[in-house]
Amino acid sequence: EINSMADFFSFFSSNIETPSSTAHEIDCLTANIVKSHRETCQYRVEELQALRWKVFSREEVLAYQSKSVEEMWQRCAYRLTDSIQYVVEFAKRIDGFLELSQNDQIVLLKGGSLEVVLVRMCRSFNPDNGTVFFEGKFGGTEIFKSLGCNDLIASIFEFSQSLCALHLSEQEVALFTAVVLLNPERACLQEKEKVARLHSHVDVTFKNTLQRSHRDTVLSKLSQKTLQLKSLCSLHIDRLRLFLELRPLLAHSLFPPLYHELFT
Ligand code: CLR
């Protein structure tokens, strides 16, 4: 289990050659990213769809709503951190990622892991009734009422709803999350060029697969999504700061160490 960035680096490995863009290499990179996604996506998409009938009852919703704000933040932070650990594992399995400097790996994960979780959320989201898979069943925004940040929750749900409307395949989710993660514009990258090269390989691969399946229109819609992701993540940080300012003593014991390290 990974609790901090230090744990993460104790798993060091791998030795990958610099990629170039022949058709064969594009296919290899696609296969590598799709496999990495499949191995680290936490739940299979068919599994999630089969569970959609399991919706929280009125009583269960009321029970969530009567939890304290601290308990609800803690539960959500634990769930998010859990899924972020899968994203760390996803990153490590992408060809070339472990070739980046430790600093740059951390910068990319700090900046991108929540964005990837929010993209992955569309797989766990049922757009027919606006519910998400949380602690074993599907629930709507009302489940999260006691967090006291309805604006953030509403924006996250709207984002998932609009992403679902694009009907991304598992291959598209895999490639899109890799593109999001390998963003060369993150502040404080030491080897920006190296990240940019890796990013452009994945980006070319992604565009190529979209073209091959006549899904070019998805591309322009996804660039909007990238902007929305950025504002969702800064809203999350704002709401977290607000929460912590009101409870300076409690804060450290409440959240998992990795959540702290990433967001505070
Ligand atoms: C995303 C896809 C992952 C599994 C997963 C785990 C935790 C879920 C997350 C998904 C979606 C967003 C989620 C989160 C737990 C809490 C959070 C439902 C389904 C909601 C939006 C509350 C966020 C509150 C912050 C203020 C901490 O594979």
Image (cartoon, helix red, strand yellow):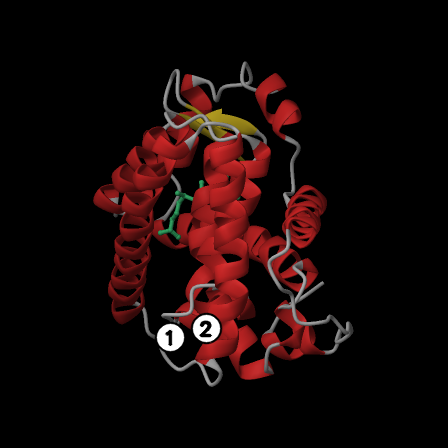
Q: How many marks?
A: 2
Task: Report the front residue among 147 and 222.
Answer: 222
Which residue shows up at 60% across the image and 75% down it? 5
User: How far apart are labels 2 and 1 at the CA level?
Assistant: 7 Å
Which residue shows up at 50% across the image and 72% down it? 195
Q: Is residue 219 above or below residue 166?
A: below
Tell me the amino acid under the disc marked 2.
Answer: His
Q: In the picture, residue 158 is in which quadrant?
A: top left
Q: Which residue is mark 2?
A: 252
| Drawn side of residue 224 relative to residue 99, left or right | left
Say few, some or many: other residues with alpha carbon within 10 Å of mark 2 (under 14 / 14 to 19 / 20 or more): few
Residue 238's label in the rendered image is none
Front: mark 2 or 1 = 2
Check mark 2 vs ligand 1: CB closer than 8 Å? yes or no.
Answer: no
Task: Report the front residue among 24 and 125.
Answer: 24
Residue 63, how many percent across, how many down? 43, 31
Q: In the picture, residue 14 is in which quadrant?
A: bottom right
Q: Which residue is mark 1?
A: 249
| Drawn side of residue 181 relative to residue 164, left or right | right
Which residue shows up at 41% across the image and 28% down it? 164
Asked if labels 1 and 2 touch by Cβ distance under 8 angstroms, the answer is yes
| Drawn side of residue 174 relative to residue 131, left or right | right
The quarter in which the C terminus is drawn is: bottom left
Residue 205, how many percent across, how many down? 55, 49
